[in-house]
């Protein structure tokens, strides 16, 4: 009951601040659909939906009103764990690409053809919007994209999911909390054809959080994943390695490495990532 009340409190604050963020955006931009306007909407929604609510909740739930203690942001970790965490995330990219490719091949039954069409349209629209956000003509715009699309989401989403939801569910049900949070984390992105790799990545962040006791480790891994995508798109769009698909989307080797003809690299990546997690786990047990 205590966990249920806390989740309702978190969701209530999240809903209220999300509406407030959208209201501020609408007053400022009149609902405009320019890239600048939509980036401001992304910024305000990230603050209102994912960043501020967990801090407010943690402030209420901690007996001494020390939210960062409750969120495990004051916990120190050895520098070697940060190095291993980054290495794991980099090595996991081909595995993520392989799983994304397999996920995209899932076909719904004929009776659900209309739903499948809607899901594919939503996926394409999300990809086109992401590409609009990723466009950067110079280093300054690249740095802004790294802040908006890599750093801020990594911090805010880890505060909400691993820092808040997973800890509220946890109790004596650590594995249930990790996987339930990973499912919600993936589902809230509203991308069916990327559900499986995002869920597994969320579970990986959850275990790293539990093993290390510090929220900064999953934040760093989340940021690494996002930053690599931002950097890969920037380098591709400023070189001759980019390819334009039927939907007008730019693809590059970073999106396909480990999938398709290089599927075997994806399998090797899964093994290396698993080994890295085992090393990380044993490292946390010896300290």
Image (cartoon, rainbow, N blue to C red):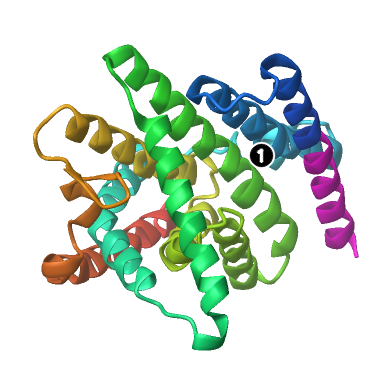
Q: On the image, numbered disc 1 is attached to which residue?
A: 50
Whether the magenta-drawn stretch holds residue 7 is answered as yes
Left or right for 73, reference 101: right
Image position, residue 114 (x, y; %): 56, 74
Q: Residues within 10 Å of mark 1 (few under 14, many from 20)?
A: many
**Looking at this view, is 195 or 4 the one in front?**
195
Outermost residue, left side: 240
Residue drawn 19% across the image and 46% down it: 252
Residue 54 sits in which quadrant? top right
Q: Is residue 148 left or right of residue 90?
A: right
Assess whether residue 33 is covered by the magenta stretch: no
Residue 78 shows up from this direction = no
Q: Is residue 173 above or below residue 151?
A: below
In which quadrant of the rendered image does the N terminus lie? bottom right
Q: Judge by depth and name the residue closer to the eye, 278 or 31.
A: 31
Give the extent of the magenta segment: 1-16
Measured as percent of width and height from the top left, residue 182 is found at 56, 62
Viewer can see residue 96: yes
Which residue is drawn at the image coordinates 37% and 31% (left, top)? 134
Residue drawn 23% across and 59% down? 94
Looking at the picture, tell me which residue is in the foreground, 227 or 217.
Answer: 227
Of residues 33 and 136, which is closer to you in this image?
33
From this view, report whether residue 30 is shown above or below residue 244: above
Q: Who's the residue at 43% across and 62% down the image? A: 194
Mark 1 lies on a secondary structure that is: helix
For the stretch drawn in magenta, the main secondary structure is helix
Residue 218 image point, x, y percent: 47, 46
The part of the image, by quadrant, that contains residue 26 is top right
Q: Position of residue 178 (x, y in %)?
A: 58, 64
């Amino acid at each position: 009951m205590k966990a249920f009340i806390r989740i309702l409190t978190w969701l209530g604050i999240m809903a209220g601040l999300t509406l407030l963020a959208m209201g501020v955006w609408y007053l400022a931009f009149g609902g405009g659909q320019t890239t600048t306007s939509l980036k401001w909407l992304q910024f305000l929604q990230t603050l209102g939906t994912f960043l501020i609510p967990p801090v407010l909740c943690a402030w209420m739930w901690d007996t001494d009103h020390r939210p960062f203690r409750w969120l495990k942001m004051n916990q120190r970790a050895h520098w070697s764990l940060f190095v291993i965490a980054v290495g794991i995330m980099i090595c996991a990219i081909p595995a993520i690409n392989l799983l994304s490719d397999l996920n995209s091949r899932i076909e719904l039954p004929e009776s659900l053809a209309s739903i499948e069409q809607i899901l594919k349209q939503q996926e394409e629209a999300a990809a086109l919007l992401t590409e609009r956000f990723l466009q950067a003509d110079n280093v300054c715009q690249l740095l802004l994209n790294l802040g908006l699309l890599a750093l801020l989401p990594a911090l805010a989403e880890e505060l909400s999911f691993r820092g808040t939801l997973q800890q509220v569910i946890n109790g004596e049900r650590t594995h249930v909390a990790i996987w339930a949070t990973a499912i919600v984390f993936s589902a809230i992105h509203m991308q069916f054809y990327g559900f499986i790799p995002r869920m597994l990545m969320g579970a990986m962040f959850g275990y790293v959080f539990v093993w290390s006791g510090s929220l900064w480790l999953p934040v760093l891994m989340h940021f690494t994943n996002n930053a690599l995508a931002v950097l890969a798109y920037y380098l591709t769009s400023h070189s001759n390695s980019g390819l334009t698909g039927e939907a007008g989307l730019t693809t590059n080797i970073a999106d396909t490495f480990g999938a398709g003809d290089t599927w075997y690299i994806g399998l090797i990546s899964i093994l290396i990532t698993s080994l890295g997690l085992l090393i990380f786990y044993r490292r946390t047990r010896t300290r």
